[in-house]
């Protein structure tokens, strides 16, 4: 396919690397930092429901009950709801389990 479009394999590889770097810097790293920050906030208010441990439904309850103290939790839940395996998703994004 690439040869029909006169695109070199090296160019495709370079584009892939650039795309991965962009995705990591603009999406993955900020989400990872926010997960860490949110878990610190959750621990600080005495909640045992941490991202990567609690279910999305439990975290949604926390967002409803403590929304004023945890305003960015609702935003994070949009990303965490992408998978039924939230613990796996967090491990892949954050690089560790909680």
Image (cartoon, grey):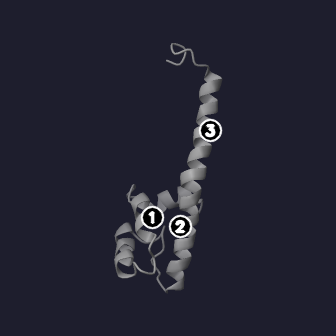
Tag 3 residue: 18
Between the residue at mark 3 and the residue at mark 2, the CA separation in whole angstroms equals 25 Å
**Closer to the N terminus: mark 2 or mark 1?**
2
Image coordinates for residue 91, horizontal then vertical, percent: 54, 60
Image coordinates for residue 58, horizontal then vertical, percent: 37, 74
Tag 2 residue: 35
Q: Quadrant of residue 56?
A: bottom left
Question: Looking at the image, is mark 3 or mark 2 nearer the viewer?
Answer: 3
Q: Nearer the viewer, residue 74 or 88?
A: 74
- The mark total stands at 3
In the structure shown, which secondary structural element does the residue marked by tag 3 occupy? helix
Image coordinates for residue 57, horizontal then vertical, percent: 34, 70
**Closer to the N terminus: mark 3 or mark 1?**
3
Between the residue at mark 3 and the residue at mark 1, the CA separation in whole angstroms equals 25 Å
Q: Nearer the viewer, residue 50 or 16?
A: 16
- Is disc 3 in contact with disc 2, using a CB cutoff of under 8 Å? no
The mark found on residue 76 in the picture is 1
Q: Nearer the viewer, residue 86 or 18?
A: 18
Few, some or many residues within 10 Å of mark 1 (<14, 14–19, 20+): some
Residue under the point 39% across and 69% down: 55
Q: Image height check: is 38 above or below 81?
A: below
**Quadrant assignment for the C terminus:** bottom right
Q: Image height check: is 11 above or below 62?
A: above
**Closer to the N terminus: mark 3 or mark 2?**
3
Residue under the point 49% across and 86% down: 46
Q: Image height check: is 20 above or below 44?
A: above
């Amino acid at each position: 396919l690439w040869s029909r479009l006169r695109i070199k394999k090296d160019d495709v590889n370079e584009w892939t690397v650039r795309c991965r770097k962009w995705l990591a810097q603009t999406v993955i790293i900020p989400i990872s930092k926010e997960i860490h920050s949110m878990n610190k906030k959750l621990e600080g208010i005495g909640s045992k429901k941490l991202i990567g441990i609690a279910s999305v439904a439990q975290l949604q309850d926390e967002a409803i009950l403590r929304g004023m103290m945890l305003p960015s939790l609702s935003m994070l839940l949009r990303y965490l709801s992408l998978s039924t395996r939230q613990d796996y998703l967090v491990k892949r994004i954050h690089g560790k389990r909680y």
